[in-house]
Amino acid sequence: MPDISASGQESDVGALWHPFSDMGAVERDGEFVIARGDGVHVFDAEGNRYLDATAGLWFTNVGHGRAELAEAAADQMRSIAAYSTFGDYVTQPTVELAEKLAGIAPVPGSKVFFTSGGSDSVETAAKLARRYWVETGRPSKRFVIGRQKAYHGMHYAGTALAGIPGNREGYGVLVAESATVAWDDVEDLRATIERIGPENVAAFFCEPVMGAGGVYPPPEDYLAGVRKLCTEMDVLFVADEVVTGYGRIGGSWFASTRFGLEPDMVTTAKGLTSGYLPMGAVLVAPRVADPFFQPDGGVWWRHGYTYSGHAAAAAVALANLAIIEREGLLDEASRLESTLAERLRPLADHERVAEVRCGVGALAAVQLADPGEAMGLARRLRAFGVATRAVGAGGLQVSPAFVMSDGEVQELADSIARALDA
Ligand code: PLP
């Protein structure tokens, strides 16, 4: 049994292979064990408290320690934890959740395809885009296009769509018919589609705010521009809202609604359950779903996951969305959009900070002048009572739960300032 040490110095790492990690370094320096969470705080094994700047990995929208969500899972598990949703099988919370998501989806009449997480959602959307064009008689439309700085999860298509070079290297060609465009230039997308030929392009994948690439809000008019271009070129527009969905964008459930994007598909996960159980969903606009819902039947989509529509996860998602509604957390995320900007922006004056990116939703990054310092600073911040991580090329991630108060944002800003000075 490995020794669990908050400081990590004496820990013996044992069997666990951490994702996205230099395991030699983790074995040398030890693990940082999170023992519990409460609201916007997490606690290590020794009981030390940290402000959770990132809401886990961008997912704890309603905050930690919500007994109501534990009870929703327990109630459902006592009745039935999960069953198949293949064919005509289904459980009640899964039906209810699909109706709920269709009701809040950016495009009315959307159908809901459940997955186990964000990477599954992206993979589902990439495959569905190609199948859609086969069903509608244009099978040559197979290329999928992503943007530089993009993160679309870690499955094959998602990795091929990614714009963070380090995440893509070392695997050979993952998806031959894929391409990457500049993250901020509509004309680059146009030129790329024209070069490949619109008759060969299935879909364009777009994070409304780039998340793991470093929190980059969209340049003015960019989203409207790429949306219009995709319509013109008859290329499906997929909004990857794994980070921005379920309120993080502030004021509405989805960034696609806030920016009027009417996407053909929306990939989601994370905030759907606030991370209390793993679950994702793809919201599919009627245009794309219709060929698979033929009244006479006969069209199968041979795709799905063992845990698509998992009953306990669906019950938790319903309870989570109810909390967001009851507590007005979409508005709280809007409040955080302003507070993060007001309280974090002064950090840009620090000599070790290059810029602070924020202003769209409960999302921000403090970009260090020397990107190589970010990981060390993130670790050092623990001594100042803050849990965060490096994001993109040398940024510090700030994506709190929507229940973080203005005072706690100030405390976060002050701690970052002190850690920068130290
Ligand atoms: N898409 C985006 C925009 C993401 O940020 C992520 C994860 O951070 C994913 C997809 C993949 O989600 P998951 O890690 O749940 O597979």
Image (cartoon, rainbow, N blue to C red):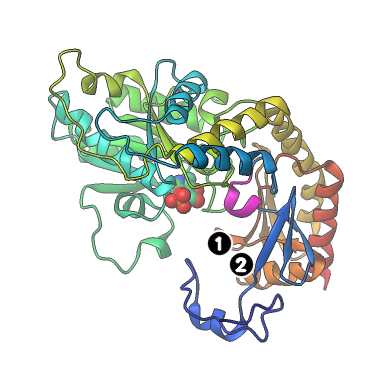
| Residue 56 location (% of width, % of height) | 62, 54
Question: In the image, is residue 311 above or below residue 167?
Answer: above
Q: Is residue 149 visible?
A: no
Residue 57 inside the magenta-drawn segment = yes
Q: Quadrant of the N terminus?
A: bottom right
Specify the amino acid type for callout 2: Pro
**Quarter of the image holding residue 41?**
bottom right
Specify the amino acid type for callout 1: Ala
Question: In the image, is residue 210 above or below residue 187?
Answer: below
| Residue 75 location (% of width, % of height) | 56, 38
| Residue 247 location (% of width, % of height) | 61, 33
Q: To which residue does mark 2 refer?
A: 371
Is 271 situated left or right of 138 in this image? right
Numbered circle sitting on residue 157? none
| Residue 8 location (% of width, % of height) | 66, 80
Residue located at (65% from left, 37% from top): 361
Looking at the image, which is closer to me, 30 or 153? 30
Q: To which residue does mark 1 refer?
A: 393
